[in-house]
Image: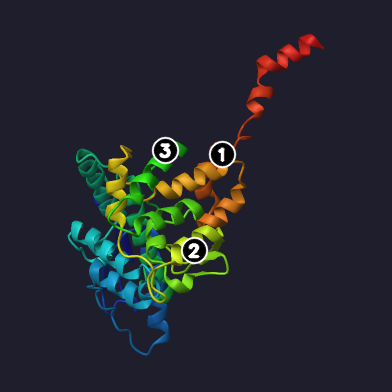
Amino acid sequence: MSLKQQKNGKWLLDFWPAGRGGPHVRKVFRTKREAEHFEVQEKAKAQSAGSYVKPKRDTRKLSDLAQEWYDEHGYLLTSGKKRLVELNAVIRSLNDPLAVAFTSNDFKQYMRERLETRRTEGFKPENDINHKLAYAKAMFNVLIKSGSWGLANPLENVSKLTMQERELTFLTIKQMNQLLSELGTARNTDVLAVAKICLSVGARWGEAESLTRKDIHHGKVHFNKTKNGRNRSIPISDDLEREIVTDRPAHGRLFGPCKDALNNGLERAGIELPRGQKSHVLRHTFASHFMMAGGNLLTLNKILGHQTIQMTMRYAHLAPEHLTEAKSLNPLVVSRKRIAA
Protein backbone atom coordinates (compact mmCIF):
# COMPACT_ATOMS: atom_id res chain seq x y z
CA MET A 1 0.00 0.00 0.00
CA SER A 2 1.17 3.49 -0.84
CA LEU A 3 -0.30 6.57 0.84
CA LYS A 4 1.26 9.89 -0.10
CA GLN A 5 0.34 13.49 0.47
CA GLN A 6 0.27 15.55 -2.71
CA LYS A 7 1.25 19.15 -3.28
CA ASN A 8 -2.37 20.30 -3.06
CA GLY A 9 -2.64 18.81 0.44
CA LYS A 10 -4.76 15.82 -0.58
CA TRP A 11 -3.78 12.17 -0.05
CA LEU A 12 -3.26 9.61 -2.83
CA LEU A 13 -4.03 6.01 -1.86
CA ASP A 14 -2.55 3.36 -4.17
CA PHE A 15 -3.19 -0.27 -3.17
CA TRP A 16 -4.51 -3.77 -4.03
CA PRO A 17 -7.35 -4.64 -1.60
CA ALA A 18 -7.32 -8.36 -2.48
CA GLY A 19 -3.57 -8.63 -3.00
CA ARG A 20 -1.32 -8.09 -6.00
CA GLY A 21 -3.36 -10.42 -8.19
CA GLY A 22 -6.60 -8.48 -7.69
CA PRO A 23 -7.96 -5.12 -8.83
CA HIS A 24 -5.71 -2.11 -8.43
CA VAL A 25 -7.25 0.97 -6.70
CA ARG A 26 -5.93 4.52 -6.89
CA LYS A 27 -8.02 7.13 -5.14
CA VAL A 28 -7.49 10.68 -3.85
CA PHE A 29 -8.85 11.79 -0.46
CA ARG A 30 -9.14 15.10 1.31
CA THR A 31 -7.65 13.79 4.55
CA LYS A 32 -5.32 11.01 5.66
CA ARG A 33 -8.01 9.67 7.99
CA GLU A 34 -10.47 9.25 5.11
CA ALA A 35 -7.87 7.38 3.06
CA GLU A 36 -6.99 5.00 5.89
CA HIS A 37 -10.67 4.37 6.66
CA PHE A 38 -11.38 3.60 3.01
CA GLU A 39 -8.43 1.17 2.84
CA VAL A 40 -9.64 -0.74 5.90
CA GLN A 41 -13.18 -0.97 4.51
CA GLU A 42 -12.10 -2.21 1.09
CA LYS A 43 -9.71 -4.83 2.51
CA ALA A 44 -12.50 -6.10 4.76
CA LYS A 45 -14.78 -6.40 1.72
CA ALA A 46 -12.10 -8.30 -0.16
CA GLN A 47 -11.64 -10.79 2.68
CA SER A 48 -15.36 -11.41 3.25
CA ALA A 49 -16.40 -11.66 -0.41
CA GLY A 50 -15.64 -14.44 -2.81
CA SER A 51 -14.38 -11.90 -5.32
CA TYR A 52 -13.56 -8.23 -4.90
CA VAL A 53 -15.41 -5.67 -7.03
CA LYS A 54 -13.62 -2.39 -7.47
CA PRO A 55 -15.82 0.49 -6.20
CA LYS A 56 -17.34 2.73 -8.84
CA ARG A 57 -16.15 6.30 -9.07
CA ASP A 58 -18.57 8.73 -7.45
CA THR A 59 -19.53 11.11 -10.23
CA ARG A 60 -22.20 13.04 -8.32
CA LYS A 61 -21.95 16.81 -8.36
CA LEU A 62 -22.84 19.08 -5.47
CA SER A 63 -26.18 19.83 -7.13
CA ASP A 64 -26.95 16.09 -7.07
CA LEU A 65 -26.27 15.99 -3.33
CA ALA A 66 -28.51 19.00 -2.78
CA GLN A 67 -31.37 17.25 -4.56
CA GLU A 68 -30.74 14.05 -2.57
CA TRP A 69 -30.81 16.11 0.63
CA TYR A 70 -34.15 17.59 -0.37
CA ASP A 71 -35.64 14.22 -1.37
CA GLU A 72 -34.51 12.59 1.89
CA HIS A 73 -35.09 15.37 4.39
CA GLY A 74 -35.58 18.87 3.00
CA TYR A 75 -39.15 18.28 1.81
CA LEU A 76 -40.14 17.77 5.46
CA LEU A 77 -39.07 21.30 6.40
CA THR A 78 -41.39 24.29 6.12
CA SER A 79 -38.57 26.21 4.46
CA GLY A 80 -37.21 23.19 2.56
CA LYS A 81 -37.81 24.52 -0.95
CA LYS A 82 -36.41 27.92 -0.07
CA ARG A 83 -33.31 26.29 1.43
CA LEU A 84 -32.82 24.14 -1.69
CA VAL A 85 -32.95 27.28 -3.84
CA GLU A 86 -30.28 28.92 -1.64
CA LEU A 87 -28.10 25.81 -1.70
CA ASN A 88 -28.26 25.68 -5.49
CA ALA A 89 -27.39 29.38 -5.73
CA VAL A 90 -24.23 28.72 -3.70
CA ILE A 91 -23.44 25.64 -5.77
CA ARG A 92 -23.70 27.65 -9.01
CA SER A 93 -21.24 30.17 -7.56
CA LEU A 94 -18.89 27.25 -6.88
CA ASN A 95 -19.34 26.05 -10.51
CA ASP A 96 -21.01 22.85 -9.29
CA PRO A 97 -17.88 20.70 -8.74
CA LEU A 98 -17.75 16.94 -8.28
CA ALA A 99 -18.80 16.30 -4.69
CA VAL A 100 -15.77 14.10 -3.97
CA ALA A 101 -13.45 16.89 -5.15
CA PHE A 102 -15.17 19.62 -3.12
CA THR A 103 -13.07 20.92 -0.21
CA SER A 104 -13.39 23.36 2.65
CA ASN A 105 -11.00 25.68 0.81
CA ASP A 106 -13.50 25.93 -2.05
CA PHE A 107 -16.20 27.13 0.32
CA LYS A 108 -13.84 29.48 2.16
CA GLN A 109 -12.98 31.08 -1.17
CA TYR A 110 -16.71 31.50 -1.89
CA MET A 111 -17.13 33.13 1.54
CA ARG A 112 -14.28 35.58 0.88
CA GLU A 113 -15.56 36.57 -2.56
CA ARG A 114 -19.14 36.93 -1.34
CA LEU A 115 -18.00 39.02 1.60
CA GLU A 116 -15.97 41.40 -0.54
CA THR A 117 -18.61 41.76 -3.25
CA ARG A 118 -21.54 42.42 -0.93
CA ARG A 119 -19.55 44.86 1.20
CA THR A 120 -18.64 46.78 -1.96
CA GLU A 121 -22.36 46.97 -2.74
CA GLY A 122 -23.02 48.47 0.69
CA PHE A 123 -24.39 45.36 2.43
CA LYS A 124 -23.35 43.54 5.60
CA PRO A 125 -23.46 39.94 4.36
CA GLU A 126 -22.00 38.06 7.34
CA ASN A 127 -25.35 36.74 8.57
CA ASP A 128 -26.40 35.62 5.09
CA ILE A 129 -23.08 33.82 4.53
CA ASN A 130 -23.33 32.09 7.92
CA HIS A 131 -26.79 30.84 7.03
CA LYS A 132 -25.55 29.40 3.75
CA LEU A 133 -22.65 27.70 5.55
CA ALA A 134 -25.10 26.18 8.05
CA TYR A 135 -27.32 24.91 5.22
CA ALA A 136 -24.38 23.30 3.39
CA LYS A 137 -23.04 21.68 6.59
CA ALA A 138 -26.48 20.33 7.42
CA MET A 139 -26.82 18.90 3.91
CA PHE A 140 -23.69 16.78 4.32
CA ASN A 141 -24.64 15.75 7.87
CA VAL A 142 -28.05 14.49 6.73
CA LEU A 143 -26.53 12.52 3.86
CA ILE A 144 -23.86 11.04 6.13
CA LYS A 145 -26.50 9.93 8.61
CA SER A 146 -28.58 8.29 5.87
CA GLY A 147 -25.54 6.60 4.33
CA SER A 148 -25.80 8.53 1.05
CA TRP A 149 -22.41 10.17 1.67
CA GLY A 150 -19.60 7.91 2.80
CA LEU A 151 -16.90 10.50 3.41
CA ALA A 152 -16.44 13.08 6.15
CA ASN A 153 -18.27 16.40 6.05
CA PRO A 154 -15.87 18.66 4.08
CA LEU A 155 -17.24 21.72 5.92
CA GLU A 156 -16.94 20.24 9.39
CA ASN A 157 -14.11 22.56 10.42
CA VAL A 158 -15.23 25.70 8.58
CA SER A 159 -16.10 28.39 11.15
CA LYS A 160 -18.85 30.97 10.91
CA LEU A 161 -17.89 34.57 10.28
CA THR A 162 -17.68 36.71 13.38
CA MET A 163 -20.47 39.23 13.42
CA GLN A 164 -20.60 42.55 15.17
CA GLU A 165 -23.84 42.63 17.12
CA ARG A 166 -26.28 44.83 15.27
CA GLU A 167 -28.22 47.43 17.19
CA LEU A 168 -31.91 46.68 16.94
CA THR A 169 -33.81 49.88 16.20
CA PHE A 170 -37.14 50.43 17.91
CA LEU A 171 -39.68 53.25 17.88
CA THR A 172 -40.15 55.70 20.70
CA ILE A 173 -43.70 56.11 22.01
CA LYS A 174 -43.94 59.39 20.09
CA GLN A 175 -42.78 57.75 16.84
CA MET A 176 -45.15 54.83 17.37
CA ASN A 177 -48.13 57.16 17.76
CA GLN A 178 -47.06 59.16 14.70
CA LEU A 179 -46.89 55.96 12.67
CA LEU A 180 -50.26 54.68 13.88
CA SER A 181 -51.79 58.04 13.01
CA GLU A 182 -50.41 57.81 9.45
CA LEU A 183 -51.53 54.20 9.05
CA GLY A 184 -55.03 55.15 10.21
CA THR A 185 -55.41 57.42 7.17
CA ALA A 186 -53.93 54.95 4.67
CA ARG A 187 -55.98 53.69 1.72
CA ASN A 188 -55.16 50.15 2.79
CA THR A 189 -57.72 49.38 5.49
CA ASP A 190 -55.77 46.40 6.88
CA VAL A 191 -52.39 47.95 7.64
CA LEU A 192 -53.39 49.62 10.93
CA ALA A 193 -54.79 46.41 12.42
CA VAL A 194 -51.74 44.36 11.37
CA ALA A 195 -49.43 46.99 12.89
CA LYS A 196 -51.36 46.91 16.16
CA ILE A 197 -51.06 43.13 16.33
CA CYS A 198 -47.29 43.35 15.90
CA LEU A 199 -47.04 46.02 18.58
CA SER A 200 -49.28 44.08 20.96
CA VAL A 201 -47.71 40.62 20.76
CA GLY A 202 -44.33 41.07 19.07
CA ALA A 203 -45.37 39.22 15.92
CA ARG A 204 -43.35 39.21 12.74
CA TRP A 205 -45.10 41.23 10.04
CA GLY A 206 -45.68 38.17 7.87
CA GLU A 207 -47.15 36.23 10.80
CA ALA A 208 -49.67 38.96 11.59
CA GLU A 209 -50.51 39.63 7.94
CA SER A 210 -51.33 35.97 7.25
CA LEU A 211 -53.64 35.39 10.24
CA THR A 212 -56.98 33.71 9.55
CA ARG A 213 -60.29 34.03 11.38
CA LYS A 214 -59.76 30.72 13.20
CA ASP A 215 -56.46 32.03 14.62
CA ILE A 216 -58.30 34.60 16.79
CA HIS A 217 -60.33 33.14 19.65
CA HIS A 218 -60.69 33.01 23.44
CA GLY A 219 -58.90 36.34 23.85
CA LYS A 220 -55.73 35.13 22.19
CA VAL A 221 -54.00 35.29 18.84
CA HIS A 222 -52.64 31.90 17.76
CA PHE A 223 -49.63 31.73 15.46
CA ASN A 224 -49.15 28.48 13.52
CA LYS A 225 -46.61 27.52 10.86
CA THR A 226 -44.14 30.05 12.18
CA LYS A 227 -40.59 30.68 10.97
CA ASN A 228 -39.06 28.15 13.37
CA GLY A 229 -42.00 25.75 13.41
CA ARG A 230 -43.09 26.60 16.96
CA ASN A 231 -46.74 27.42 17.56
CA ARG A 232 -47.52 30.09 20.13
CA SER A 233 -50.64 31.68 21.58
CA ILE A 234 -50.56 35.16 23.12
CA PRO A 235 -53.33 37.06 24.94
CA ILE A 236 -54.69 40.26 23.42
CA SER A 237 -57.11 42.88 24.72
CA ASP A 238 -60.85 42.64 24.05
CA ASP A 239 -60.69 45.94 22.15
CA LEU A 240 -57.98 44.66 19.81
CA GLU A 241 -59.82 41.38 19.22
CA ARG A 242 -62.97 43.27 18.22
CA GLU A 243 -60.97 45.55 15.93
CA ILE A 244 -59.33 42.58 14.25
CA VAL A 245 -62.48 40.59 13.48
CA THR A 246 -65.11 43.33 12.95
CA ASP A 247 -66.11 43.79 9.30
CA ARG A 248 -63.59 41.18 8.17
CA PRO A 249 -64.10 37.74 6.55
CA ALA A 250 -65.58 35.04 8.79
CA HIS A 251 -63.40 32.45 7.08
CA GLY A 252 -59.94 32.42 5.56
CA ARG A 253 -57.39 35.22 5.78
CA LEU A 254 -58.33 38.37 7.65
CA PHE A 255 -55.95 40.71 5.84
CA GLY A 256 -54.61 41.35 2.39
CA PRO A 257 -50.97 42.28 1.60
CA CYS A 258 -50.12 45.54 3.34
CA LYS A 259 -46.34 45.68 3.82
CA ASP A 260 -46.01 48.42 1.20
CA ALA A 261 -48.58 50.45 3.11
CA LEU A 262 -46.43 50.08 6.25
CA ASN A 263 -43.34 51.32 4.40
CA ASN A 264 -45.28 54.28 3.02
CA GLY A 265 -46.55 55.10 6.51
CA LEU A 266 -43.01 55.05 7.92
CA GLU A 267 -41.91 57.41 5.17
CA ARG A 268 -44.82 59.82 5.74
CA ALA A 269 -44.08 59.80 9.48
CA GLY A 270 -40.47 60.74 8.75
CA ILE A 271 -39.09 57.62 10.43
CA GLU A 272 -35.76 56.50 8.96
CA LEU A 273 -34.58 52.98 9.74
CA PRO A 274 -31.43 50.94 8.98
CA ARG A 275 -31.52 48.70 5.94
CA GLY A 276 -33.45 45.50 6.57
CA GLN A 277 -35.28 46.61 9.74
CA LYS A 278 -38.49 48.10 8.34
CA SER A 279 -40.59 44.94 8.54
CA HIS A 280 -39.19 43.98 11.96
CA VAL A 281 -39.24 47.39 13.65
CA LEU A 282 -42.64 46.79 15.26
CA ARG A 283 -41.50 43.45 16.68
CA HIS A 284 -38.35 45.14 18.06
CA THR A 285 -40.50 47.97 19.44
CA PHE A 286 -42.69 45.52 21.35
CA ALA A 287 -39.71 43.61 22.77
CA SER A 288 -37.76 46.74 23.71
CA HIS A 289 -40.61 48.46 25.54
CA PHE A 290 -41.58 45.17 27.19
CA MET A 291 -38.11 44.97 28.76
CA MET A 292 -37.92 48.69 29.61
CA ALA A 293 -41.22 48.33 31.46
CA GLY A 294 -39.70 45.59 33.64
CA GLY A 295 -40.78 42.51 31.66
CA ASN A 296 -39.25 39.10 32.28
CA LEU A 297 -36.67 37.86 29.78
CA LEU A 298 -37.93 34.25 29.82
CA THR A 299 -41.48 35.43 29.25
CA LEU A 300 -40.31 37.56 26.32
CA ASN A 301 -38.54 34.51 24.89
CA LYS A 302 -41.83 32.59 24.86
CA ILE A 303 -43.81 35.50 23.44
CA LEU A 304 -41.37 36.05 20.56
CA GLY A 305 -40.96 32.30 19.96
CA HIS A 306 -37.16 32.41 19.87
CA GLN A 307 -35.46 29.03 19.67
CA THR A 308 -32.74 30.04 22.13
CA ILE A 309 -32.53 32.43 25.06
CA GLN A 310 -29.40 33.91 23.43
CA MET A 311 -31.58 35.45 20.72
CA THR A 312 -33.77 37.11 23.33
CA MET A 313 -30.75 38.32 25.32
CA ARG A 314 -30.32 41.06 22.71
CA TYR A 315 -33.01 42.95 24.61
CA ALA A 316 -31.64 42.30 28.12
CA HIS A 317 -29.70 45.56 28.31
CA LEU A 318 -32.96 47.51 28.18
CA ALA A 319 -34.21 46.12 31.50
CA PRO A 320 -34.26 48.80 34.26
CA GLU A 321 -32.09 46.68 36.58
CA HIS A 322 -29.59 45.60 33.90
CA LEU A 323 -26.05 45.80 35.32
CA THR A 324 -27.13 48.30 37.99
CA GLU A 325 -24.52 46.73 40.29
CA ALA A 326 -21.93 48.74 38.35
CA LYS A 327 -23.19 51.88 40.14
CA SER A 328 -22.78 50.48 43.65
CA LEU A 329 -19.89 48.04 43.29
CA ASN A 330 -17.34 50.02 41.30
CA PRO A 331 -14.04 50.75 43.12
CA LEU A 332 -14.71 54.50 43.51
CA VAL A 333 -17.90 53.88 45.47
CA VAL A 334 -16.43 50.95 47.41
CA SER A 335 -13.39 52.99 48.47
CA ARG A 336 -15.59 55.88 49.69
CA LYS A 337 -17.64 53.46 51.77
CA ARG A 338 -14.49 52.03 53.35
CA ILE A 339 -13.17 55.50 54.20
CA ALA A 340 -16.50 56.47 55.71
CA ALA A 341 -16.51 53.29 57.77
**Label 3 vs label 2: CA separation?**
35 Å
Q: Is residue 86 left or right of residue 227?
A: left
Q: Amino acid under label 3?
A: Glu
Q: Is residue 151 left or right of residue 63?
A: right
Residue 292, numbered circle: 1
Q: Amino acid under label 2?
A: Arg
On the image, which quarter does residue 133 sit in?
Answer: bottom left
Q: Position of residue 172 (x, y in %)?
A: 45, 37
Residue displayed at 22% across by 60% down: 89
Circle 3 sits in a helix, a strand or a loop, which is it? loop
Q: Is residue 138 left or right of residue 304?
A: left
Q: Position of residue 212 (x, y in %)?
A: 42, 71
On the image, which quarter does residue 321 sit in?
Answer: top right
Q: Is residue 62 left or right of residue 279?
A: left
Q: Position of residue 192 (x, y in %)?
A: 38, 54
Q: Amino acid under label 1?
A: Met
Q: Quadrant of the C terminus?
A: top right
Q: Position of residue 244 (x, y in %)?
A: 44, 63
Circle 2 sits in a helix, a strand or a loop, which is it? helix
Circle 1 sits in a helix, a strand or a loop, which is it? helix
Residue lying farthest left?
Answer: 95
| Mark 2 surroundings within 10 Å by alpha-carbon count, few (fewer than 14), some (14 through 19), many (20 or more) | few
Which of the pair 312/240 is nearer the observer?
Answer: 240
